[in-house]
């Protein structure tokens, strides 16, 4: 092959990709086993009355009174991570990603695992339907996070306040409502072939929820009755300037100590890099900061509209995306994707309209998706994504595998879109084709499953070497079946501080993972690395499904 061949730049980039990272011997991974366990994890996160076919048998019923204080049934749903709170915002994103996994890769799943994936989605959507069951109201959270994070107890024993947090019109909740609309719309597509009536209910509800999000624009944390419960845990910190002085955000001293100095005393919080920087400045300056928190809801409005467009094929949502893109920040070209920021996922999702639907009026979204893919390619002139020396995608801020799994998912989805339209991405000096995107995705998946400097699987229960001391209350405390007596709030501290492995294996849980040096200490107290979350696993379901059907990444 000579240098003038059209395939030469792609071959060169492949060589650079694999030369850049030290290669670790492939373990010929059992992607089917990993997929099964990845889905099983969600049973360990269930809240509510557990069904007779519950497979994670060390769990039991919990949160059976959720919503009773406001005379609404809010039982069910998922605990987001290692705590006992039901945060609506990340739960909705988790649901969207599970549904998207089924939409794009469901046909590649073994039939039993497709059924299990749909069960996992429905456990969430049944709950989300409850949160929007009342006109002009959305329930955004159940549980007081401060009291919950001050305890270390099983969900079956929790005696902390199950405070219900709701937003009523005309007050804003655009990011939660927008993401909930996306979740319900995407899930309607996942259920369309197996339960048409349920799918119609989901889509009809999604339409109403999106109307709330768009009509009452603003961040849900702008509401004084919500702010202290969702910040700093799940505020949307990705861009919109909201009028919330830092002095009005009630951040506990324990949180600042935890995030800056690592003195966590059994507490756990969710914090991205921007939040940590703000808190460091706040702590060190000893000044009243008149600058405001940075928040956004615009990406969730576009995201919700994009999913409603795909689920309904209604041109009104296509027009919304076209007419509101500029004012809602679609041109910001932010290379992020996760519960907090939908930009990269939005661009990939809408690109399908361009690549396969020939809707060229949306070309700017495809251009942004192309740009994002170029940032993933090592040695691309636009490369901005960091990799560890072992080859893992790395972004600062902790819980790094949430980035690795979501970006991996997007690269596989986009590879499919490009493949079906026979296109590649021009990244200046190099060209990125579907094969290369899949190879890069496989490198991330294999790293997580054990092809890494530690030789450790970061999925609990997969292989013989995986984290034993994950930051998870239910997993770390003897189960209610082995220890029927209640273990109160502070009585669980002995289990948190123990150096023993967790007694209950949360099979399939993908933890936060290693840092930029590929190092991982199996330490329960280090929640940044050892805590699993639902939104780490959800996109990983889709990625694993692809490699079940394509283990050789051809």
Image (cartoon, rainbow, N blue to C red):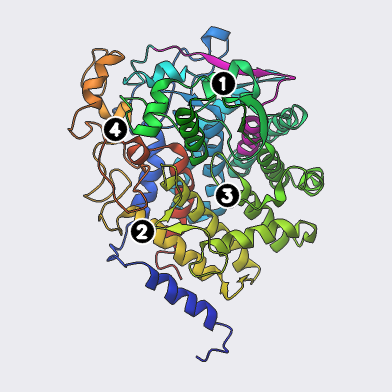
Return the residue nearer the eye: 378 or 283. 283
Q: Residue at x 65, y 30 (%)?
A: 177
Q: Which residue is mark 1?
A: 247
Could you tell me which secondary element the residue under label 2 belongs to?
Answer: helix
Q: Which residue is mark 4?
A: 525
Q: Nearer the viewer, mark 4 or mark 3?
A: 4
Q: Nearer the viewer, mark 4 or mark 2?
A: 4
**Residue 103, numbered circle:** 3
Q: Position of residue 408 (x, y in %)?
A: 48, 55
On the rendered structure, is 262 left or right of 251? Answer: left
Going from the N terminus, do you reach mark 4 or mark 2 first?
A: 2
Label 4 – label 3 distance at C-alpha: 37 Å
Q: Is residue 481 visible?
A: no
CB contact under 8 Å: marks 2 and 1? no
Magenta residues (range): 160-184
Q: Nearer the viewer, residue 293 or 388?
A: 293
**Up-down: is 235 above or below 112?**
above
Residue plotted at (57% across, 65% down)? 382
Of badges 4 and 1, nearer the viewer stands 1
Rate crowding at label 3 as few (under 14), some (14 to 19) or many (20 or more) other CA atoms within 10 Å: some
Cα–Cα span, label 4 and label 2: 26 Å
Alpha carbons under labels 3 and 2: distance apart: 23 Å
Q: Secondary structure at mark 3?
A: helix
- Disc 4 secondary structure class: loop
Q: Is residue 182 above or below residue 162?
A: below
């Amino acid at each position: 092959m000579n240098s003038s061949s059209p395939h030469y730049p792609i071959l060169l980039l492949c060589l650079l990709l694999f030369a850049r990272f030290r290669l670790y011997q492939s373990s010929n991974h059992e992607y089917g086993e990993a997929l099964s366990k990845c889905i099983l994890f969600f049973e360990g996160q269930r809240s509510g009355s557990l069904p007779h076919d519950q497979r994670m048998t060390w769990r039991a019923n919990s949160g059976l009174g959720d919503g009773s204080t406001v005379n609404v049934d809010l039982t069910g749903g998922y605990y987001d991570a290692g705590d006992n709170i039901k945060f609506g915002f990340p739960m909705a994103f988790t649901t969207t990603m599970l549904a998207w996994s089924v939409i794009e890769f469901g046909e590649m799943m073994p039939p039993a695992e497709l059924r299990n994936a749909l069960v996992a989605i429905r456990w969430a959507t049944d709950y989300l339907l409850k949160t929007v069951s009342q006109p002009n109201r959305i329930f955004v959270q159940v549980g007081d996070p401060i009291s919950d994070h001050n305890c270390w107890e099983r969900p079956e024993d929790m005696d902390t306040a199950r405070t219900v947090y709701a937003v009523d019109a005309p007050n804003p909740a655009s990011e939660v409502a927008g993401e909930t609309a996306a979740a319900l719309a995407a899930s309607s597509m996942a259920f369309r072939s197996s339960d048409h009536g349920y799918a119609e209910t989901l889509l009809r509800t999604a339409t109403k929820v999106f109307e709330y999000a768009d009509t009452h624009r603003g961040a849900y944390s702008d509401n004084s009755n919500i702010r202290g419960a969702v910040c700093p845990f799940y505020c949307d910190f990705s861009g919109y300037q909201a009028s919330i002085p830092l002095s009005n955000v009630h951040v506990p001293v324990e949180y600042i100590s935890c995030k800056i100095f690592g003195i966590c005393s059994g507490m756990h919080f969710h914090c991205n890099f921007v939040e940590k920087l703000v808190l460091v400045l706040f702590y060190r300056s000893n000044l009243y900061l008149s600058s405001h928190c940075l928040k956004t809801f615009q990406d969730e409005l576009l995201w919700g509209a994009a999913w409603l467009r795909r689920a309904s094929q209604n041109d009104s949502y296509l027009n919304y995306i076209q007419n509101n893109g500029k004012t809602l920040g679609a041109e910001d070209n932010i290379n992020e994707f996760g519960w907090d920021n939908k930009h990269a996922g939005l661009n990939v999702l809408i690109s399908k309209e361009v690549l396969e639907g020939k809707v060229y009026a949306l070309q700017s979204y495809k251009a942004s998706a192309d740009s994002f893919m170029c940032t993933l390619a090592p040695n691309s002139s636009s490369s901005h994504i960091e990799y560890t020396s072992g080859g893992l995608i790395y972004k600062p801020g902790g819980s790094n595998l949430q980035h690795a799994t979501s970006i991996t998912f997007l690269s596989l989805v986009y590879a499919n879109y490009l493949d079906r339209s026979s296109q590649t991405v021009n990244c200046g000096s190099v060209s990125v084709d579907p094969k290369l995107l899949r190879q890069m995705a496989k490198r991330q998946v294999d790293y997580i499953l054990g092809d890494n400097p530690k030789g450790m699987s970061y999925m609990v229960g997969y292989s013989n070497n995986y984290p034993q001391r994950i930051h998870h209350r239910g997993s770390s405390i003897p189960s209610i079946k082995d220890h029927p007596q209640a273990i109160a709030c502070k009585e669980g501290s002995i289990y948190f501080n123990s150096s023993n492995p967790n007694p209950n294996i949360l099979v399939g849980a993908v933890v936060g993972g290693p840092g930029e040096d590929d190092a991982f200490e199996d330490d329960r107290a280090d929640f940044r690395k050892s805590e699993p979350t639902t939104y780490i696993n959800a996109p990983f379901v889709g990625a694993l499904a692809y490699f079940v059907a394509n283990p050789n990444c051809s």
